[in-house]
Amino acid sequence: MKELEDRIRQDGIVKAGNVLKVDAFLNHQCDVELFDHMGAEWARLFEGANINKILTIEASGIGIACIAAQHFGNVPVVFAKKAQSINLDGEQYATTIYSFTKKREYPVIVGRRFLNPDDHVLIIDDFLANGCALEGLITIVESAGATVEGIGIAIEKGFQGGGDKLRERGYHVESLARLVSMDCETGELTFA
């Protein structure tokens, strides 16, 4: 998606350790018009898929997923929580994932009443690096007996291999911007 790639080139900051900072428009301050265009593109890419629910993970995926849901007939958006709270009641699906940016493991939890075997789920997230977060969300969907219809990613760091592993396992992964390299010294970004 050229619009997203252009925005990354304009406002993204490449940092050491394969970190791409896009907080000016994607995961701290949100460009809602860009999110709308991203949702329209995912709707085109997943046209014909039987999607009745979108699953994401807090916090960065929530805004993107909610705007995208409008392009899928306003399907419900469920987000996995990263911590137990008093608001999480009843039975839950839970797993542990490793965060590339936070460099630590944390639990992800979804209330069982929000996912069931009749659900056909599109997973949406802001980044795909090594795929750990997505593996956790896939585990939750499978635990519910639901079906993963596809995975929509805003920015994939293709050089970290997570997307390739998911595609090899047969998942329909659509990344709107796929980086093949980034250089923290020059700030240069190369897209697929």
Image (cartoon, rainbow, N blue to C red):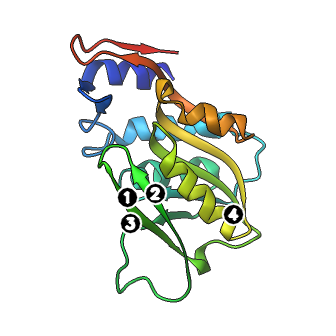
**Residue designated by label 1:** 105
Tell me: residue 23, above or below residue 111. above
Tell me the residue at 55%/32% (across/down): 175
The reply to whether discs 1 and 4 touch (Cβ–Cβ < 8 Å) is no
Residue at 42% in and 13% down: 190
Q: Quadrant of residue 76?
A: bottom right
All told, the count of numbered labels is 4
Badge 4 amino acid = Glu
Residue under pointer 3: 82
| Residue 177 left/right relative to 13 | right
- Tag 2: amino acid: Ile
- The residue under label 4 is 142
Q: Amino acid at mark 3?
A: Lys
| Residue 43 shows in the view | yes
Neighbour class for label 1 at 10 Å: few (<14), some, many (≥20)?
some
Which mark is first along the chain, 4 or 3? 3
Between the residue at mark 3 and the residue at mark 4, the CA separation in whole angstroms equals: 18 Å
- Observer-side mark, 1 or 4, equals 1
